Amino acid sequence: MSPLMWSPELWWDLFCHFLDVSLMAIGGAITLVPDLHRRLVVDGHLLSDLDFTSAIALAQAAPGPNLLFVALMGWYSAGLGGSSASMLGIMIPSTTLALAVSRWVSARRSWLSVQAFQAGMIPVTLGLLLATGAHLAPSLQTQPKALLMSVVVALVVWRTKVGLIWLVAAGGLLGGLGLV
Amino acid sequence: LATASLVGAAPSAGQIVGTVLKLAAPIKDHVLGWPLCVLLASLAFAMMAWLHWPLLYVLLGLGCVTCIGTYALLRHRALSKANDKAKGASA
């Protein structure tokens, strides 16, 4: 892959996939991960399994919004053009909807239907987020140590206020020393 | 290199699961009650992670059922509250 590769068909493919999933990102773009894997890796062959996972790991570890995994997937798949096409695809519908709906919703907070939607989507979103976590988790058979690391990180994030950057640094150190 | 990058996803997985556990705290006060919330979350999880259903079906199917159920419950509560008030006023 060269950053400046010219592949309009791939860009269009990426744009359409991200456009499709954009409005489904109810719990944030990260809930889209299992669906994106099915589309981009299993069915579309636009990305390798490894690039897919790396894009998420890198975006989660780097500062800035984790939505940037979308740009990285586009980048791994089709260079700079792929990156831009993917970001446009995911941003256009969701941003438009958010701008249009957020004022409408905040003016109707007292409506039962609005409350029902907001409350009702909570358990579904939690389940979807958990599915993303499971998708990224290392396997118990082949990488038990890495899985242990996931469990420790989960407990630290849940129970403490330790900054994520320290967890990333610790993970990097363990990985660098070849312990995981 | 392959394993190195896959291990790189290990903290991300942990981070996401940790966030879920953090976000799950308010469901003990949820309208549907926490056991039902846990059941619904498990269903959503199973549909995505285990059955590999398209997200659209999960959102439209489970999402709609959950939202309609929540709506019915909220309405029922609002109505019975109104009834109680009316009774209190007439007594």
Image (cartoon, rainbow, N blue to C red):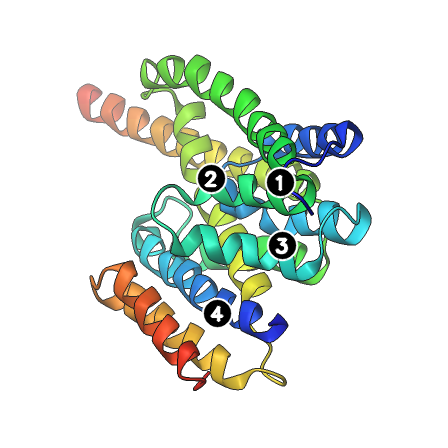
Marks 3 and 2: which is nearer the front? 3
Whether residue B36 is visible, yes or no, is no
Instruction: Look at mark 4 in the image and give the residue it sits on.
Output: B10
Instruction: Look at mark 3 in the image and give the residue it sits on.
Output: A52
Distance from label 4 to label 3 (Cα)? Answer: 14 Å
Q: Is mark 3 on a helix, strand or loop?
A: helix
Residue A125 placement, left or right of A86 = left
Q: Which amino acid does label 2 sit on?
A: Gly
Q: What residue type is labelled 4?
A: Ala
User: Does the residue at mark 2 contact the one at mark 1 (Cβ under 8 Å)?
Assistant: no
User: Does the residue at mark 1 contact the one at mark 4 (Cβ under 8 Å)?
Assistant: no
Instruction: Look at mark 2 in the image and give the residue it sits on.
Output: A120
User: Does the residue at mark 4 contact the one at mark 3 (Cβ under 8 Å)?
Assistant: no
Q: Is mark 4 on a helix, strand or loop?
A: helix
Q: Nearer the viewer, residue B9 or B13?
A: B9
Marks 1 and 4: which is nearer the front? 1
The percent position of residue B53, horizontal first and vertical second, equals 73, 50
Q: Earlier in the sequence, mark 3 or mark 2?
A: 3
Distance from label 1 to label 4 (Cα)? Answer: 27 Å
State the mark number for residue A3.
Answer: 1
Residue A118 placement, left or right of B50 = left
Residue B52 placement, left or right of A124 = right
**Is A128 drawn above or below residue A177 in the view shown?**
above
Distance from label 1 to label 3 (Cα)? Answer: 17 Å
Could you tell me which residue is drawn at 23 percent across and 60 percent down?
Answer: A163
